[in-house]
Amino acid sequence: MISNSQALLQLLESVAGGDISVDLALEKLKHFGYEPVGDFARIDHHRTLRTGFPEVIWGPGKTAEQIAEIIQRMQPHHDCVMATRISPEVFGQLRSPLPNLYYFPQARICSTCDLPETPTQVGQIGLLAAGTADLPIAEEAAITAQLSGFAVKRFFDVGVAGIHRLLSIQTDLAEMAVLIVVAGMEGALPSVVAGLVEAPVIAVPTSIGYGANLGGLAALLTMLNSCAPGIGVVNIDNGFGAAMLAAKMVRSQQKIIGND
């Protein structure tokens, strides 16, 4: 069985010998190997080459020791390593092996870098939350997007129960490249927003609501059944997934503009 190092050596020798082009070698590297961490993880260092964004650590189900070791292995390869759904208790345990780790408590995200002072990516993402109770999921999306280099403009507590709050920011919403709309209860906000703006809308149902909300299922079904065109829906409480989808949308827009 050929090891990763042997395969890489063969690839480099093929480039040096003129057997394959540099472009073809880069394409092969996009799908090249991984780094094992103990017997519990395999880090995909080349995900950035394939998808534009590095692998992110999912915190639940992992011990603090496992998370710390994965972060330490990833640090030499990435400018910023991020882990999601990190409780304050787990973060407290991570601070000993990783004293320079940053923590964003409302978003429950920790990272090896702070929020950038200026965006490194082109295009602004708008983030709307229907109510204050939706903010943890909204902040997960916002911090994820910011750590990925995007400018994020927040519009919080603009739910449909007070529709005038939403209508008062309509001009601001028109300036966004894409909108992430987070809502619990009946989940009507994305439909209303999509009827007001040109930008695509990413709907995020949250598990906030009374009994018939069914842990976010009611909001999810409302968003899936929206009659307003231009809405994409992610899973319940998936702020991270919404941010990644928004980031890819904005980067795709910029790529199209660059090719024109």
Image (spheres, rainbow, N blue to C red):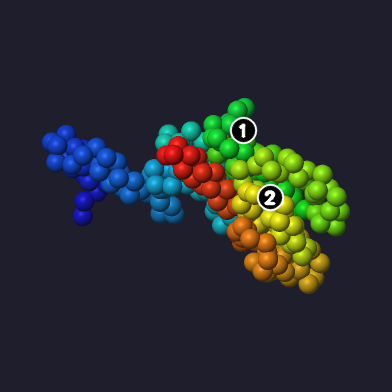
- Check disc 1 and report its element: helix, strand or loop: loop
Q: Residue at x 70, y 67 (%)?
A: 222
Q: Residue at x 77, y 65 (%)?
A: 186
Tell me if 14 is positioned left or right of 133 in this view.
left
Q: Residue at x 81, y 56 (%)?
A: 160
Which callout, 1 or 2, points at the residue further toward the start of the chain?
1
**Can you tell which mark lies on residue 197?**
2
Give the quarter of the figure containing the N terminus: bottom left
In this view, the residue in front, 141 or 221, is 221
- Check disc 2 and report its element: helix, strand or loop: loop
Q: Is residue 239 visible?
A: no
Tell me where residue 97 sits by quadrant: top right
Residue 20 is situated, as x and y percent measured from the top left of the image, at 18, 42
Give the quarter of the figure containing the C terminus: top left
**What is the crowding at mark 1: few (fewer than 14 residues within 10 Å), some, or many (at least 20)?**
some
Tell me where residue 92 sits by quadrant: top right
In the rendered image, the residue lying farthest to the front is 260
Q: State whether residue 254 is above or below residue 63.
A: above
The amino acid sitting under disc 2 is Val
Q: Residue at x 42, y 39 (%)?
A: 259
Tell me if 123 is positioned left or right of 12 in this view.
right
Tell me if label 1 and label 2 are in contact, CB under 8 Å: no
Residue 103 is situated, as x and y percent measured from the top left of the image, at 64, 38
Tell me if 111 is positioned left or right of 132 in this view.
left
**Can you tell which mark lies on residue 115?**
1
